Amino acid sequence: MTTTTTPAPAVRPIDPAVHRTLLVRDDAGRPPVRSTDETGGAPLRCCLTRALPGDRIALVGYAPLRRWAAETGADPGPYDEVGPVFVHDGACPGTGAAWPAAFHAGDRVLRAYDRRGHILGGVTVTPETAEAGAAALLADPEVAVVHVRALHFGCFMHEVRRGA
């Protein structure tokens, strides 16, 4: 008997090259808002970690679906949106491809998009069910990409694609 395993979802923070451009001008055409996270805890989308007390951070407008569409040739049309995200204000140590469990302190909404960049639907998940929820959405061949968003504020957290 042959068994197959579904690869874990591929977690994708903001790409380092994109991160560098956002520190000059963000996806809304504005300069970043720079600050020091005095108490720590800001969710950094460049490395999917939380800022440490005293870290220099930048708040930028980011268009995750637009960035994905530019890479894939999709046209998300009205689903293209820009929202606020925190990133390191300068060099970022990066992250691995594992699910960033420590990054997710609250409930999330997983939004599934098709190859055109149009929304197919979404599910609400807890930190404990988020990775499995993303894998379940990606099991549908119509789903091309999943965005993880904070439930209460709606902010983009990170992207998930099918694993290799």
Image (cartoon, rainbow, N blue to C red):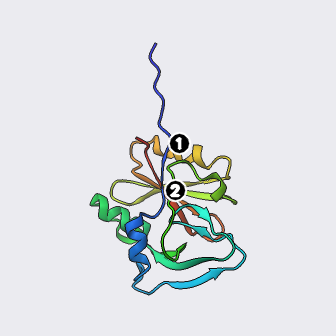
Furthest residue in direction left, as rendered: 73
Q: Is residue 116 above or below residue 23?
A: above
Q: Nearer the viewer, residue 53 or 120?
A: 53
x and y, in percent, of residue 161 in the image? 44, 50
Judged left or right of residue 125, residue 2 is left
Judged left or right of residue 148, residue 104 is right
Residue at the spot 68% in from the left edge and 47% down from the top edge:
128
Secondary-structure class at tag 2: loop
x and y, in percent, of residue 25 in the image? 40, 83
Q: Nearer the viewer, residue 64 or 123?
A: 64
Furthest residue in direction top, as rendered: 1
Residue at the spot 48% in from the left edge and 84% down from the top edge:
32
The residue that disc 1 covers is 136
x and y, in percent, of residue 111 in the image? 51, 57
Distance between mark 1 and mark 2 Cα atoms = 23 Å
The residue that disc 2 covers is 95
Q: Is residue 98 above or below residue 37?
A: above
Secondary-structure class at tag 1: helix
Viewer-nearest of discs 1 and 2: 2
Displayed quadrant of residue 153: bottom right
Label 1 vs 2, first from the N-terminus? 2
Q: Nearer the viewer, residue 136 or 72?
A: 72
Residue at the spot 38% in from the left edge and 54% down from the top edge:
114
x and y, in percent, of residue 95 in the image? 52, 56
| Tag 2: amino acid | Thr
Q: Is residue 68 above or below residue 42?
A: above
